[in-house]
Image (tube, rainbow, N blue to C red):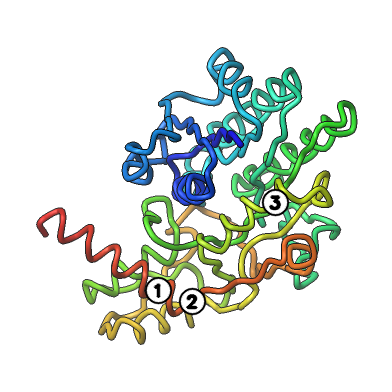
Amino acid sequence: MKALITGGAGFIGGHLSELLLNRGWQVKVLDDLSTGSKNNIEHLTANPNFQYAVDTVLNEMVMDRLISECDVIYHLAAAVGVKLIVKRPIHTIRTNVEGTDCVLKAARRYHKSVVIASTSEVYGKSSSIPFREEDDTVSGPTTKHRWAYACSKAIDEFAAFAMAKETGQPVYVVRLFNTVGLRQSGQYGMVIPRFIKKALANEPIPVYGDGSQSRCFGNVKDVVRALADLVLCDQAQGQVVNLGADEEITINDLAQKIKSVLGSSSEVVHIPYNKAYEEGFEDMQRRVPCLEKAKRLLNYEPTISLEDTIREVAEYLRGVKSNNGS
């Protein structure tokens, strides 16, 4: 099997590339390195079955050639991180909507399978917990930049299913919940590496809002295993599938757990949303996936605990600090 992974130098893309190579696949990665990093794939470059190109999914000529040479496209390229989304809403919409359109057009031309990496943000303000794939989505107002990401990813889903309906080609949509693990950067607001970095330095841990908002954190190794299995499951074609973990924890409790696991003396400080992001910022109070479909189709279950993930990320960040000589 030959896979093209757009956004493949990102945190998830690097892990997916590694797993597919270990399963004997040929993997090509396309990434413009705007949020991805060569550090995520550097250890793979010696593998003869791995290639990467630095370019954008908006380059139609490059996408045409790469897609013509693969069997499956994992479309992971997207704007990532709440801070980036709020700061650059035009970039968010263009990257997500136009990028996906470019991928789908080329995939249609060569009748290739496509996996669209969507997001739990699509559920929006829904209060129906846990979130099921068939649930209604409840978006916020268009004047709030936060919701541009959710709506742009929802359009990606609509576009993928429209193509599948008209052409009959295989399309898969996964809604990724908070995914964490080795090599994840806190640069774009990802909460666990950001908290761990502060805890390791015994510096104040900044919690946005009152900290009562809750999330579920799945380890990237579990998530990419499901992504790899997805395209081998005929019943998953034309489906939306939640991926992540379903153990819920508030951000306040997450900060305390990180302190406890790492033996940190850090103080937890609360920062209002309007200072962390922008005036009138809206957040999702709870984000909990129903994983029944993933279990039924893929035999998927999270296997790595949050505590082990915290230790894994902390060990990695210690190594980064040591290699940087600080």
Q: CA distance from mark 2 to mark 1?
A: 6 Å
Other-residue count near label 1 (Cα within 10 Å), few / some / many at <14 / 14–19 / ≥20: many
Label 3 is placed on what type of residue?
Leu
Kindly identify which residue carries mark 1.
310
Kindly identify which residue carries mark 2.
306
How far from the left and from the top, in percent, is residue 225?
58, 57
Work out whether mark 3 precedes mark 2 in sequence or the reverse, and give the earlier one. Answer: 3
Counting every numbered tag in the picture gives: 3
Q: CA distance from mark 3 to mark 1?
A: 27 Å
Quadrant of the rendering where the C terminus is positioned: bottom left
Describe the element under mark 3 as helix, strand or loop: helix
Of the two numbered discs 3 and 2 in the rendering, the one whose residue sits closer to the viewer: 3
Label 1 is placed on what type of residue?
Ile
Label 2 is placed on what type of residue?
Leu
Q: CA distance from mark 3 to mark 2?
A: 24 Å
Q: Residue at x 64, y 45 (%)?
A: 117
**Picture layout, residue 174 above or below residue 63:** below
